Amino acid sequence: MKLLWGLLVSLLPMAVSAHSINNLPIDSINKGIRFETGLNWAQVLAKAKAENKYIFVDCYTTWCGPCKQMENSVYPLEKVGKYFNDKLISVKAQMDTSKKDDAAVKSWYADAHYLQEQYKVDAFPTFLFFTPDGKILYKSVGAKAPDEFLALAADALNPEKDYYKLLEHFKQGKEDLTEMSHLARTGLSLGDTATARKMAEKYIAQLKNKALLTKENIQFMHDFTKSSADKGFKLFYLYGDSINKIMGNDTYSQQFVHSIIYKELVLPAVEKADRLDHSTPDWSAIAAVIKKKYNEYYSERVITGARCTWGINHKNWSEYTKYLVLFQENFGSKSNNDAMASLVLNNYAWDIFQHSKDRQELIKALSWSSRAVMMNPSNNWMDTYANILYKLDRKKEAIMWEEIAAKLSPTDTDIQVNLEKMKKGEPTWPTN
């Protein structure tokens, strides 16, 4: 079974175990954060300025599990309420709409949309902090434990980390490496991309020798390298294996270099072909350009990935599965102890199961699925393994694995339906 990427992303921020509000101490209930009601965004800004208070905005959605976690387990705590109520005006902004929305939520639709667009809110929960005069000061994403959340707020309000004051220091010629790093990251999160890029370039330019190859600085360069002309690109290209070891990911550098080369040398040709009916990019010509500018490895890697993407975008399933197998076999991660590697293997295997009739491709997919199950013996991964076995006419083994998956997740209707189809000899894959 393919675990949807959106579902995965929505679960990642849940770093704290969820508790019902009923589990909170009685004396903490109603002593938490007091969220303003009855005021629109303009009135909140006016109130903050009049009272010289910072503003905290909780950007949430009705479907977001981590948002409910904050609502039930963090916001009601007395120690959290004491800090926030003393220093901040707090408001909640619902970023989606639902049939259950009351008049208060509906009155904030326009303001919520403005905040979402203006401050690029695309993951939930997102926490926004503003100065008393209404300037965006800090942005953070993902559920937090109570102490972590308090530390986050303290950082946001810390005058020594004030983005605008540090920016003024920089303009006055006070170039401190630590400040430049902080300014670049903060500017990026706040959408001040021009400032962020300027700071990043200065920061990276001043890093010397071993200071470049630390986990923190590698991640920094990853975030701020946008083209092959940037210094970071050269480091990822030349010292890929060393960077991979530091980051604990055997394809970290290659994936990144691949993405830049694809964007610069392949995507323009793909977009041109898409504008012309019945046109296909000249893969051989593009491969030759990449080989000349870089090397044969990246020529083969990028073109293989590009043809895989082209196949799926144009619903050419034989093209897609052919190049997916080639890509994974030649350029995929060889790690056997990484959660993301397990997810990728499972999803690739599921796509081959769904779209391929080629026995050799299915056998390759079975080997990926087997590795995924060994790394993560979950019901979803076993379901993938069982389905591929079944499509390979290994019915007895398939039913055995699907029965195990069904026992691990008795409420999963998809697995139960697949098991019944296997027992009846019916296809479990799309037949159209």
Image (tube, rainbow, N blue to C red):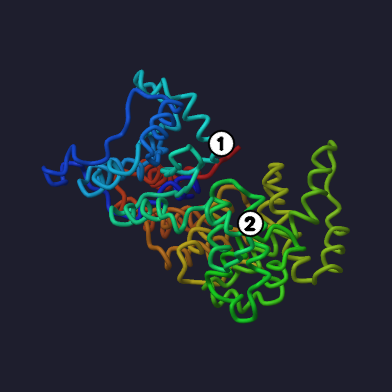
Query: Element type at marker 2?
Result: helix
Query: Horizontal placement of 8 versus 310: left or right?
Result: left
The dot on residue 118 is 1
Query: Horizontal placement of 160 versus 190: left or right?
Result: left
**Labels 1 and 2: the sequence-earlier one:** 1
Residue at 71 percent across and 48 percent down: it is 311
Query: Horizontal placement of 368 versus 230: left or right?
Result: left
| Location of residue 432 (image quadrant) | top right
Could you give the CA–CA distance between mark 1 and mark 2, rounded to whole angstroms?
A: 25 Å
Residue at 30 percent across and 54 percent down: it is 145
Residue 224 position within the rendered picture, expressed as x and y whole percent measured from the top left:
64, 59
Q: Which residue is mark 2?
A: 171
Residue 288 position within the rendered picture, expressed as x and y whole percent measured from the top left:
87, 64
Residue 154 position within the rendered picture, expressed as x and y whole percent measured from the top left:
36, 54
Regarding residue 329, the answer to whether it shows in the image is: no
Amino acid at circle 2: Lys
| Location of residue 172 (image quadrant) | bottom right
Q: Nearer the viewer, residue 110 or 21?
A: 110
State the residue lying farthest toward the left: 26
Query: How many C-alpha atoms fall within 10 Å of the one at disc 2: few (<14), some, or many (≥20)?
Result: few
Residue at 53 percent across and 60 percent down: it is 182
Regarding residue 386, the answer to whether it shows in the image is: yes
Amino acid at circle 1: Gln
| Location of residue 241 (image quadrant) | bottom right
State the residue lying farthest toward the bottom: 210
Query: How many C-alpha atoms fall within 10 Å of the one at disc 1: few (<14), some, or many (≥20)?
Result: few
Q: Is residue 131 above or below residue 219?
A: above
Q: Nearer the viewer, residue 217 or 310?
A: 217
Comparing marks 1 and 2, which lies closer to the viewer? Answer: 2
The dot on residue 295 is none
Q: Is residue 310 above or below residue 297?
A: above
